[in-house]
Image (tube, rainbow, N blue to C red):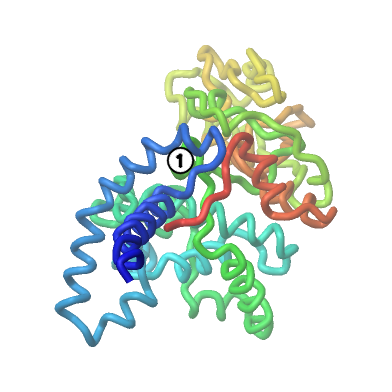
Amino acid sequence: MRGKKKSLPWAVLGLVLALLWCALGAPLTQSEWEGLPARISRGWRQMPVQLARIFSLWYTPQASAMAQEEAPLLRVYDTEADAVRLLSLENYVIGVVAAEMPASWPEEALKCQAVAARTRAVGSSGMYGGTGCASHPGADVCTDSACCQGWLSPEGRKAKWGDSWQPLEQRVEQAVAATRGQVLTYEGEPIEVLYHAASGGQTEDAAEVFSRSVPYLCSVESPGEESYEGYAVEQRFTLEEAAQLLLAAFPDCGVEAGALPSQLEMVSLSDTGRVKEMRVGNRTVEGVEVRAALGLRSTLFTWETEGDTLIFRVRGYGHGVGMSQAGARAMAAEGDACQTILAHYYPGTVLAQLP
């Protein structure tokens, strides 16, 4: 009997240590140990929010079950409704996947999109130590794809999919459920997620687009995109239209419709063949600025003139950094699993489970 009493404190101590070990993510590998300080720091930042939630559950017992089911809640600014929605993380991810990727695509590609969407939300959410949406103070994220991520409400999904709503809704929900709580991390922290529709065969290094290097946002090959409908397009402008658009963007460039063909010149390309700089009239401007001025699908372009028409031949769609959605679809169609695809487009990252 005495032996049992003596062993009880040790059993309790062992249980406490085991719980602490799990709370810290049960680090086993060297990279996980290196990320341990970041986990502890994140946990410390989250403590006030978590304590407030526990306190609210104590004093609102009737809402306890509902809050646990919906936790963690995100403050999502709905740009269409001009209002903040309170959504569970997983319900929010369903709406993002529905908005950002065709629901008919392979399941492993949808799962990749779910992980990417969840990671981006977690990285921004105040619940996890993020600073929230830069354009909408007080919100964790917004539904503007140019700012945070696109998002579709249940009503919006029904309107988009029509008679196919039920099977497509089920596909998206299954992909989200299969990855529930999974996020991509680097050194113990959620990564900065970037993705785009199609890269044109090779993704771009973040330093080329955003002027800062990110270890896991480097250039990688993205084969199989050719079957994507928007892989390569022609965008045409009359010389007059092009001159007006360029003058609106660069008022002092001095371009004229009649002289425009000779007033455009390539200055430099990135290693992936994207336009870094070009001469527009008497100015040297960045490729991303020309893309924005003319509404081009990417900076992976060439141009030529036919009569009074300026033709831009463009490959890819988007900034080209991070995961190519078309590339993820191609890899999934070849049988690659979600984890393999994510590791390809975000090298050095670890797929982790939220606590």
The part of the image, by quadrant, that contains residue 177 is: bottom right
With respect to residue 178, does 303 lie above or below?
Answer: above
Q: Disc 1 marks which residue? A: 188
Observer-nearest of 265 and 88: 88
With respect to residue 257, does 145 lie above or below?
Answer: below
Count of all numbered marks drawn on residues in the image: 1
Residue 239 placed where, x, y %?
65, 32
- Residue at the image point whose x is 54% and y is 24% from the top: 207
- Residue at the image point whose x is 58% and y is 25% from the top: 287
Q: Is residue 12 left or right of residue 323?
A: left
Q: Quadrant of the C terminus?
A: bottom left
Residue type at mark 1?
Gly
Observer-nearest of 203 and 238: 203
Label 1 SS: loop
- Residue at the image point whose x is 18% and y is 81% from the top: 60
- Residue at the image point whose x is 43% and y is 55% from the top: 144
With respect to residue 9, does 291 lie above or below?
Answer: above
Residue 103 placed where, x, y %?
66, 68
Residue 242 placed where, x, y %?
60, 33
Crowding near pointer 1: few (<14 within 10 Å), some, many (20+)? many
Asked if residue 119 shows in the view, the reply is yes
With respect to residue 332, does 156 lie above or below?
Answer: below
Q: Is residue 207 left or right of residue 252?
A: right
Q: Is residue 246 left or right of residue 142?
A: right
Q: Residue furthest left?
A: 59
